[in-house]
Amino acid sequence: MHSTVIDTVEFPVRERPAAWAETMALAQVTQRVKFLETATFGARIEMMPLGVGQVSALSYASLIAQRTPRLVRQSDPEMYHVALVTAGEIGIEQYRQSCLLKRGDMGFFDSSRSFDTYAGDTPGKTLLFQFPKKLLRLPHEQFTRLCGLSLPSTDGVARLFAQFLVGLAEEYVHCTPQDVTRLGNTALDLLSTVLAHHFDQDSAPSGGRAASGESGQDVLFLRISAFVVEHLRDPALGPEAIASAHRISLRYLHRVFQQNGTTPRAFIRQQRLDRCRKDLADPALERLTIHTIAARWGYPQPDGFSRAFRTATGMSPSEYRAAMRGPTPALDAAGDEGGGGPRQPSAPVVRPPM
């Protein structure tokens, strides 16, 4: 895959601030930029699209970038942002919380609210993971509690996520379109694990273990999860059936799921859609129709499945399947595939006009 690279060093000094302001708009979140040292300002961004969002490698110094309430009202892509600092220092502020991110720290942003970022004289380098809010399996209120704050990525699952982002940026050029779509899903899964781990630790007592009541609910949630997965093919699967099978009330069932940041219906829907996505991306199942795949995972009505799939992914099932297959190989006059295998589309390197 080819990334999109914009480097202000290629512009005359007087044109660099305007070029960078335009670049931030290309990065999907418009910001107002103030340059502290216009004469020496330099910045670079490499944008790497994924199937579920984008990873960008940024390097800049001596600037303040503000996403103001007015800019939010003008355009909001409704995305979450996770910034991993790989060098230097970056200051962030949102939701009346602020911190200074140093190397190895992660910061969090919500595109729907104003925020400020700033960098001093020492160039800061950041990997920025952006993705639609609706794809994160975490309540909005939990994510926004982290906005303007930092988490270390020096150990545990956070370190795994950070290493993955760094490796993805380094090897992006060697990936196919199908690779980056799958890697985008992996990035989301790893991030969800990081955040779930953080909130598990945050909610536990000082001894580090959850209270006995929560522990019992955790075990029950695992049992219910296994039951749901086992019965996904049943279109009648719902909260009532789950509660009855486990001999608990509907109210208690919802409480168990609430403790895990979701609802019974949302969990069922997510599990079904995850399996549909995997089947649509599986070359071994390409002879199965979309309706057949949907029906085997509890979606007997094609229209209902298409609406649910588009809401979750931003793509129709057929568009998603085509994206995962990649470009169609050229055919010769006899109808056979031409030599050399399928070609991968290459996005041109986009640079602002001189």
Image: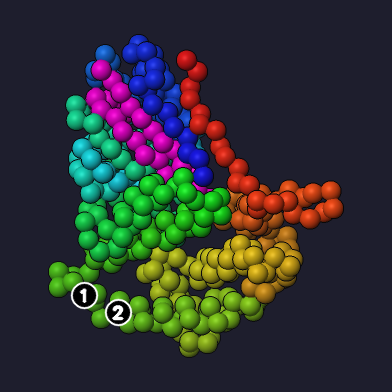
Q: Answer with the quarter of the image where residue 117 lies.
A: top left
Q: Nearer the viewer, residue 57 or 274?
A: 57
Q: Is residue 116 visible?
A: no
Q: Which residues are magenta?
A: 40-65
Mark 2, other Cα within 10 Å: few <14 / some 14–19 / many ≥20: few
Q: Nearer the viewer, residue 195 or 336?
A: 336
- Residue at (47% x, 39% y) in the render: 3
The circle on residue 209 is 1
- Residue at (35% x, 79% y) in the render: 217
Q: Main secondary structure of the magenta part?
A: strand
Callout 1 amino acid: Arg
Q: Relative to 126, does residue 44 appear above or below in the rendering?
A: above
Q: Relative to 187, does residue 25 appear above or below in the rendering?
A: above
On screen, residue 306 versus residue 179, left or right, reads right
Instruction: Name the secondary structure under disc 2.
Output: helix
Cα separation, mark 1 vs mark 2, equals 9 Å
Q: Relative to 351, does residue 185 appear above or below in the rendering?
A: below
Does 195 lie within the magenta span?
no
Q: Which residue is mark 2?
A: 215
Choose the circle earlier in sequence order: 1 or 2: 1
**Percent position (x, y) of residue 304?**
69, 62
The circle on residue 175 is none
Q: Nearer the viewer, residue 244 or 104?
A: 104
- Residue at (56% x, 79% y) in the render: 240
**Percent position (x, y) of residue 165?**
36, 51
- Residues at circles 1 and 2 in contact by the CB criterion of under 8 Å: yes
Does 64 lie within the magenta span?
yes
On screen, residue 347 versus residue 202, left or right, reads right
- Residue at (39% x, 68% y) in the render: 260
